[in-house]
């Protein structure tokens, strides 16, 4: 298979894995408390990342202060995102969760521009408005009513995740930061944060079924470790624009898996909201990317900003 097709296939696989994470997280939280699910997911991820760091013989330098400091802070913000996402998906549909969290795509540039960079074009705000309308339709479902707890939590998760992604760029751009080591620090911090509240649920963990453990392992090894490393490998072999386009199919996979495997249903209004959300996020992403490219005309192109994995 040509390198370009192989790279596209890997990026689509990452988007599919992230899209499936919402149903996996929703199913796991039926059997176990949310904080227990998060602790196991983080602990397994930390062990896997630690093993990968130890196995890399070609990297002999020690850990940098930037990796430890940035990883510690990002570990806290990432934990906050996953708390909101996992509680949110436990109280709404996997399809809704995957669609609402995609608001991150249009919220992140807004937060990034708050650092004093030039404003975004009007078309971007039209796309953002389309996404807001889409959220309203998704929340409405069969009629207008107050947002369900799960939908409100996913909205909060989208805002916090956008801040997290912007913070990743601020803390890592131009610094000697290794992505795998950064992820390792984040997973260790997350494990430490979720261990105390998870202690009371250790008997429940020990007595969990094989199906539940398979879901936890899938969330940790595939939706976290594999997805991040595969994404990093693929982005190094294609353009950031193409990578963003393919990774942006995540909400489509979330809806397809939620309906196909989870037995969920979309009302007419929710279906219209899903279509508007996908349209708005793609449009907003394209406008922001074109605006950023125009700003860089005549300048040296900086290194790609590290992307942060999504998924529940």
Image: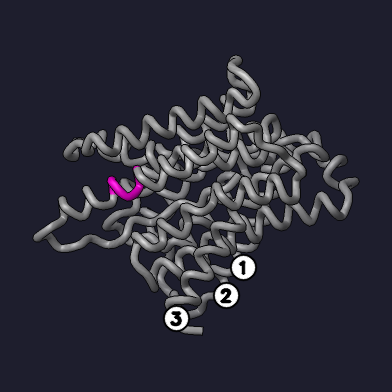
**Above or below 142: residue 14:** below
Magenta residues span: 284-288
**Above or below 85: residue 177:** below
Which of the labelled discs sits on residue 3, or is there none? 3
Q: Which residue is mark 2?
A: 55
Secondary element under disc 1, as helix, strand or loop, is helix
Residue visible at 33% across and 56% down in the picture: 305
* Crowd band around label 3 with a 10 angstrom C-alpha radius: few (<14), some (14–19), many (20+): few
Q: Main secondary structure of the magenta part?
A: helix
Apparent side of residue 127 relative to residue 147 in the rendered image (left or right) = left
Question: Quick check: marks 2 and 1 in contact, CB under 8 Å?
Answer: yes
Could you tell me how far apart the alpha carbons at marks 2 and 1 are, in whole angstroms?
Answer: 6 Å
Residue visible at 72% across and 43% down in the picture: 37
Which of the labelled discs sits on residue 39, or is there none? none
Q: Nearer the viewer, residue 4 or 218?
A: 4
Which of the two marks, 2 or 3, is nearer to us in this view?
Answer: 3
User: Whole-percent x and y of residue 231?
Assistant: 48, 63
User: Whole-percent x and y of residue 90?
Assistant: 70, 34
Apparent side of residue 221 relative to residue 6 in the rendered image (left or right) = right
Q: Which residue is mark 1?
A: 51
**Above or below 46: residue 205:** above
Residue visible at 46% across and 52% down in the picture: 248
65 drawn magenta: no
User: Whole-percent x and y of residue 66?
Assistant: 36, 53
Could you tell me how far apart the alpha carbons at marks 2 and 3 are, in whole angstroms?
Answer: 26 Å
Q: Nearer the viewer, residue 74 or 124?
A: 124
């Amino acid at each position: 298979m040509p390198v370009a097709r192989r790279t596209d296939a890997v990026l689509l696989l990452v988007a599919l894995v992230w899209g499936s994470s919402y149903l996996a997280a929703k199913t796991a939280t039926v059997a176990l408390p949310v904080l227990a699910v998060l602790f196991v997911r983080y602990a397994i991820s930390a062990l896997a990342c630690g093993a990968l760091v130890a196995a890399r013989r070609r990297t002999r330098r020690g850990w940098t202060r930037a990796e430890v400091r940035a990883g510690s802070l990002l570990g806290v913000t990432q934990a906050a995102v996953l708390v909101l996402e996992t509680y949110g998906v436990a109280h709404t549909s996997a399809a809704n969760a995957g669609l609402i969290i995609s608001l991150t795509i249009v919220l992140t540039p807004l937060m990034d521009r708050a650092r004093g960079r030039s404003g975004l074009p009007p078309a971007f705000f039209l796309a953002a408005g389309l996404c807001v309308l889409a959220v309203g339709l998704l929340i409405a479902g069969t009629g207008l009513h107050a947002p369900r707890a799960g939908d409100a939590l996913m909205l909060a998760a989208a805002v916090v995740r956008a801040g997290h992604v912007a913070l990743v760029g601020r803390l890592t751009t131009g610094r000697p930061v290794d992505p795998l080591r950064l992820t390792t620090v984040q997973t260790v911090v997350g494990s430490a944060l979720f261990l105390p509240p998870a202690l009371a649920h250790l008997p429940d963990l020990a007595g969990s079924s094989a199906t539940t453990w398979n879901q936890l392992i899938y969330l940790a090894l595939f939706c976290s470790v594999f997805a991040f490393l595969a994404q990093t490998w693929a982005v190094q072999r294609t353009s950031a624009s193409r990578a963003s386009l393919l990774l942006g199919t995540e909400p489509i996979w979330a809806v397809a898996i939620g309906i196909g495997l989870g037995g969920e249903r979309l009302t007419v209004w929710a279906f219209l909201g899903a279509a508007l959300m996908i349209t708005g996020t793609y449009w907003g992403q394209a406008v922001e990317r074109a605006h950023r490219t125009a700003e860089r005309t005549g300048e040296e192109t900086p290194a790609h900003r590290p992307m942060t994995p999504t998924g529940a």
